[in-house]
Image (cartoon, coloured by chain):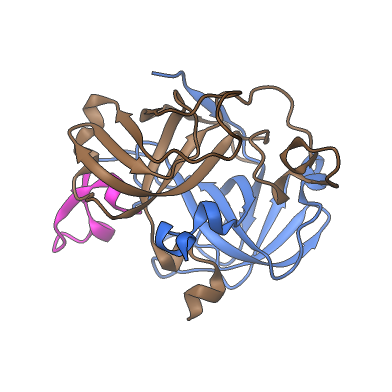
Chain colours: A brown, B blue
């Protein structure tokens, strides 16, 4: 098995979503991703309207990540394997959302639809590419 | 800015794709993801035909990750910011592909369509969820 991998966040989320205040599964209509200033050049070529996949850390979900969990923590739901769920409590606390670019300015990327709380560390930004990211049935269409 | 994040792979890819031998951007018709045995229970609930997003490490892409790169390393292509490209050479070497489940048995998950070389460390497995993963235009449909 391969070694550990250490990642350094490329930036941080700034938006209105607060843990315990905002509705669960809320998506911010507008989030600013503030990149580390030295990475701003990496945004070259991004434009409003483009779809991106944001990879972030579930930084407020430290603690146990049971291998079987109830969906949304609801005890009425059956227990399922964590890899069947989008729970933030995972062996590696990585989150993903496909968002839409609203603005790009310097080291600030403004996006619509991110479901990450204010202060969330951002690990990667990727262009959405249907041949990699769409379900296979759609890729074959 | 948040601290570093250290991840431990949950498993490894076994397939026919070899760096420098297989065609670039190839997708394996069949890959076995061998999970660490103690994580097998996390696969409960996965079934053939399901779409998953696999998060993996570009473990063979160590080295420099310039902020502007040519698409597919082709000098004929214009330089673009790394966050506009799916290049494996990134500030954080994370890769994503949406795949289809073929089989689940114990700690082995067999999938179709993964574009990762044999030996790739797997970091997370998530169910594909259209409201998070589809482009926003599709989510609104």
Query: Where on the picture, by quarter, is residue B106?
Result: bottom right
- Tell me the quarter of the image containing the N terminus of chain B: top left
Residue at x 51%, y 55% (from the top left corner): B133
Q: Is residue B76 magenta?
A: yes
- Vertical arrangement, residue B96 with respect to residue A76, above or below: below
Please report the bounds of the magenta region as a residue range: B67-86
Q: Position of residue B97 (x, y in %)?
A: 51, 58
Residue A77 x, y percent position in the rendering: 83, 45
Query: Which residue is at a point 34% across and 45% down the rendered structure image?
Result: B89
Q: How many marks?
A: 0
Name the foreground residue: A106 vs B90: A106
Left or right, B100 with respect to A126, comes to right
- Residue at the image position 19 percent from the left and 50 percent from the top: A45
Q: Is residue A22 above or below residue B38?
A: above
Q: Residue A33's spot in the image, x, y percent?
A: 34, 33
Residue A82, horizontal then vertical, whole percent: 73, 43
Residue A104 found in image quarter: top left
Specify whether residue A108 is in view. Answer: yes
* Visible residue check, residue B21: no
The answer to whether residue B50 is left or right of residue B38 is: left
Residue placed most toward the observer, B109 or B52: B52
Q: Is residue A18 magenta?
A: no
Specify the farthest residue to the bottom.
A141
């Amino acid at each position: 098995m391969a070694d550990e991998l250490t990642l350094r966040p490329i930036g941080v989320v700034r938006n209105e979503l607060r843990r315990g205040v905002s509705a669960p599964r809320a998506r911010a209509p507008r989030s600013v991703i503030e990149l580390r200033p030295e990475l701003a050049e990496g945004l070259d070529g991004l434009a409003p309207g483009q779809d991106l996949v944001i990879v972030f850390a579930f930084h407020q979900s430290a603690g146990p990540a049971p291998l079987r969990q109830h969906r949304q923590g609801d005890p009425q739901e059956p227990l399922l394997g964590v890899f069947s769920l989008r729970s933030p409590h995972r062996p590696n606390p990585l989150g993903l959302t496909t968002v839409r670019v609203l603005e790009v300015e310097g080291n600030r990327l403004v996006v619509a639809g991110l479901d990450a709380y204010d202060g969330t560390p951002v690990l990667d930004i990727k262009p959405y590419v249907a041949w990699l990211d769409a379900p296979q049935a759609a890729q074959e269409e």
